[in-house]
Image: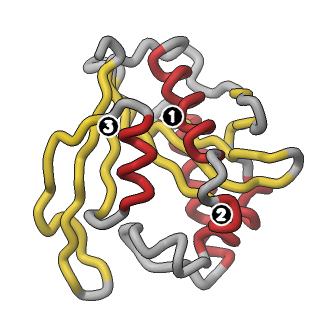
Amino acid sequence: MTLQANLRTERLILRPLAPGDAGAVFTIMSDDQAMRFWDWPAVREPQTVAEIVTGQIADMAQGRAVYWAAALGARVIGACDLSEIDRHHGRAEIGFLFDRAYWGKGYATEAIAAVIGHAFGPLGLERLWARFHAGNEGSRRLLERLGFVREGTLKGHIVRDGLRRDCLIYAKLRDG
């Protein structure tokens, strides 16, 4: 099973994340608004993002995850991933983060649909799940549009800015 693959949509190319993508990822991760529903606040140091990208590339090399840069032409506008890949149980967590300038234009939906197709197709996974902070209506709408259903709430799952936050769990099975 080949985890890493280039994926194409009508408007985007999703390619495995590379060290040179750290600058574009920093642009997104340094935006307070884009990061308001993440487990940690906006990142202020480009070196921190470079280290995150290096760790993600190492996870790909170990077969634990796939991280894609979502590119519109030559410009990286977001990132998508399958992490926590469990081949025995045929499942993975799906995630995404896009530049705020590209919100509301269908790019994230397009990219995640391609990731789902890859996960349920060539990768042979049976279950995908997503975790996001309560109140993140954009993520909720995107996931529901793509057939994910709510499974539950993780009460006080994350501490962010000194406060405990609930997270919602949504999932999708290949056959329903």
Q: Is residue 62 left or right of residue 84?
A: right
Query: Mark 3: which amino acid?
Result: Trp
Rate crowding at label 2 as few (under 14), some (14 to 19) or many (20 or more) other CA atoms within 10 Å.
Answer: many
What secondary structure is found at the residue carrying circle 2?
A: loop
Dividing the picture into quadrants, the one containing residue 50 is: bottom right
What secondary structure is found at the residue carrying circle 1?
A: loop
In the rendered image, residue 82, in percent from the top left (x then y), is placed at 47, 37
In the rendered image, residue 12, in percent from the top left (x then y), is placed at 75, 38
Q: Residue furthest left?
A: 155
Instruction: Find disc 3 in the rendering and name its residue.
Output: 129
Instruction: Find disc 1 in the rendering and name its residue.
Output: 62
What secondary structure is found at the residue carrying circle 3?
A: strand
Q: Residue furthest bottom?
A: 162
Query: Mark 2: which amino acid?
Result: Asp
Instruction: In the rendered view, tell whether residue 73 sits above or below residue 14.
Output: below
In the rendered image, residue 115, in percent from the top left (x then y), is placed at 55, 30
Instruction: In the rendered view, tell whether residue 78 sits above or below residue 15.
Output: below
Image disc number at residue 99: 2
Residue beneath the point at 69% across and 27% down: 7
Rate crowding at label 3 as few (under 14), some (14 to 19) or many (20 or more) other CA atoms within 10 Å.
Answer: many
Query: Mark 1: which amino acid?
Result: Gln
Front one among 151 and 48: 151
Quadrant location of the C terminus?
Answer: top left
Residue beneath the point at 74% across and 63% down: 24
Instruction: In the rendered view, tell whether residue 109 sits above or below residue 132.
Output: above
The numbered mark, 1 or 2, whose residue comes first in the sequence reads 1
Of circles 1 and 2, which is in front? 2
Image disc number at residue 103: none
Q: CA distance from mark 1 to mark 2?
A: 28 Å
The numbered mark, 3 or 2, whose residue comes first in the sequence reads 2
Rate crowding at label 1 as few (under 14), some (14 to 19) or many (20 or more) other CA atoms within 10 Å.
Answer: few
